[in-house]
Amino acid sequence: MKINKLKSLIAGTALAAGVGFSATAQSSLAHTGDWKSYSKDATIEAKVDSLLALMTLEEKIGQMTQFPGKTAVTGPAIQDDYKEYMEKGLVGSMFNVFGAKGLRQLQQYAVENSRLNIPVLFAADIIHGYKTTFPIPLAESCSWDLELMERSARIAAEEGTAAGISWTFAPMIDTSRDPRWGRVMEGAGEDVYLGKKVAEARVKGFQGIESWEDFGKPNTMLATAKHFVAYGAAEAGRDYNTTDMSDRTLRETYFPPFEAAIDAGVATFMTSFNEIGGVPCTGSKYLYSDVLRGEWDFRGTVVTDYTAINEMVDHGFAEDLKEAAQKSLDAGIDMDMNGAAFIKHVGALIEEGKITEDHVNQAAARILELKFILGLFEDPYRYMDEEREAATIEKAEYFEEARRNAQRSIVLLKNENNTLPLAKKEKKKVALIGPFVKERMSLNGDWAIKGDRKKSVTLEEGLMAAYKKSKVDFLYAQGATLPRKIEAENAKTAEEIQSKVEEALAVAQDADEIIVAAGEFWKWTGEAASRTDITLPKSQKALLRALKELNKPITLVLMGGRPLDLSWEEENMDAILETWYLGTQAGHAIADVISGDYNPSGKITLTFPRNVGQIPIYYNHKNTGRPEDPAKWADYKSTYLDVPNTPLYPFGFGLSYASFEYKNLNLSSDEFSKGGNITASIEVTNTSKVDGEEIVQLYIRDIAGSVTRPVKELKGFEKVMIKAGETKTIEFSIDESTIEFLTFNNVVAPEAGKFNLWIGTNSADISNAASFRYVENANN
Ligand code: BGC
């Protein structure tokens, strides 16, 4: 995906510029032992040690170097410049090269032509599918279905490992609360509790292991917790921008998904591009040595983000690349992605006594350990089996799962007068309008690594298949074009826009109702795709306004990678379906929801603001000393003059074709003490005539603490299928783990006092509330 950029980098400043080793560093290549002769039963540590003892300094630094791939559609070709490095044993890892055949060739060259025959570790950004493309991660998180997320990561790993990859740069687990930031599409939204669960599910899915020994199986892969840390808090939502926050906020909001990933056994971490408190993360001793390896005892490998060491010079944290290399090694970084900082400068840094060889030994050992764990020394080609690749990629069952997943990622935001579903048996003319009706290229979204964009099912194709035998007639007009670049959209003249609108009006006036498919071209969200204006593109907005004048029911089907400002749409559209980018099976899944073959169940995991000025806006904010409480403050309160404090759609919000009633909230007791617990239960009735799934959410508020607590915190959820007319009782257990937090004394502990509790259908639902107390025991 970023191949051109990669090519220019390698050809220019970075790896191709040469390897800066001194004579002493290039010690004799002769060796006396052979790692292959060591017993297979020796511990991995012993194997690593014995191999390290045979390696020159240069070879060890080579292990710490990750090369970018020069990939072709059919697989990578061995390039002359790789050959030279491979022959010297300097290519520890390569990324974004694919395909069993090509990678086998590369591996063979590396293994057969280097002195110690050490295999290369192949990595890639397998984020939401490899070939079979699943919904973008933000969309998938709206399913709140952890098993579903684990399964899609597993399928991505099955396909990716069959294509030669044994390390993915995923999951991205950055908490993010700013829809201006294009990379919100890649994570699980704003919430810490949900973020931890999703991190865990995705790590488990990608790695596919019960214990470390399982990495020996050829369908398992190393996962990466990225980007450590607080990358999602970029000031003003501008990608790569500075972040700054208290250590408390880091620990409460940004660290937890990373700790959860470690608990789930994640093998590697990636640094982030941003600085925090004046220190670029890639050079932060605090983050990598003190917290990650010290406090959390993480034993795995840390790779930089793409040229992140080099960027420390631009940050103003190092005068040159050499100093940057030193600072990142000091911080505890093991592998340099694409930057050539280690390969060029570590030899000299050791000679000058600025770092020790121990640094290098430790980092190289961690990387070799991964290769031993994956069994690459026993069989360097274990991931490169063309037959397995052919049998695994794009299996029919993966496509079925992608469709199921996409159905569950859709969120119904509005449905006035039961505009949806669109019955198949009613005789109707429906105008399909908008640039996304036939749009195919956007459907996979950003980070769809090898998913064939030309194969993804469009909305039109999905609807045609679903309504083939129906009485519904579809008409079509594009109504607005979809430029790839925002500049081109902005440059459209009023006449150009109007002439496309006229086409649409001519078609739509013959229809009984209208479905408009609108949104952002896929390049408008993702990396380096921040926006300050998060409304629909102006020509699409003009189209909607004109269609509104026809006074017919309008369903807006949205595609995009971020919450948009939909204030006008909420007021003027009859139904709104947020479909994000749903991947390979997008059109089918949307048609399933439009037709009611699948009853939508998704709920948003990132707040939709009323306008861009409210950002950052998230449900678990603090109360302030002057909250919006009419009983207390008529004026001089923490509000805006022009919009309410509330969002357009709150976290956890999403509708169904069914309707659910919550009642009889009950607490087993109104207090508990150390070691104890209480049960909160509620009855949820499906009061409609259709079966539906509901995501029942538990929130609490700690009324007073040694530090202030948010107005609400998600502490549990359950996704349940409730049949028409059925009532289910949902229970949550509340104990110390529910109420503990990082106290003023910097320990995670519960504090005695009063708590409010709500169980409801979204974070703003306060209709079922109760309170309880946590009391200290006499011996506390
Ligand atoms: C991104 C990472 C990604 C890497 C390799 C970087 O620009 O920030 O998330 O893994 O590129 O493609």
Image: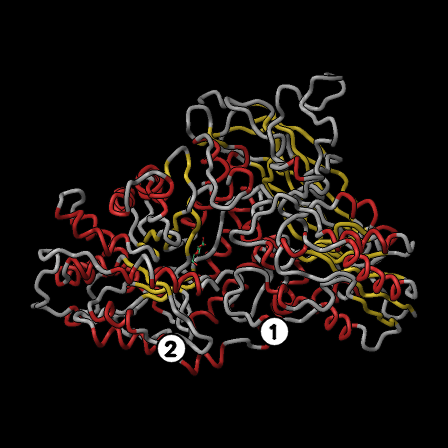
Residue type highlighted by circle 1: Lys
Separation of disc 2 and disc 1 at Cα?
23 Å
- Residue 179: assigned label: none
Residue depicted at 81% across the width and 73% down the height = 467
Q: Position of residue 439 (x, y in %)?
A: 68, 67
Residue 248 located left or right of residue 116? right
Work out whether residue 706 or residue 302 is closer to the camera in this orientation and state it: 302
Task: Residue under label 1, please give it.
Answer: 454
Work out whether residue 558 or residue 467 is closer to the camera in this orientation and state it: 558
Secondary structure beneath label 1: helix
Name the quadrant where ligand 1 sits.
Answer: bottom left
Residue 552 located left or right of residue 588? right
Task: Residue under label 2, please give it.
Answer: 102
Q: Residue furthest bottom?
A: 387
Residue 691 location, quadrant: bottom right
Q: Position of residue 372 (x, y in %)?
A: 27, 64
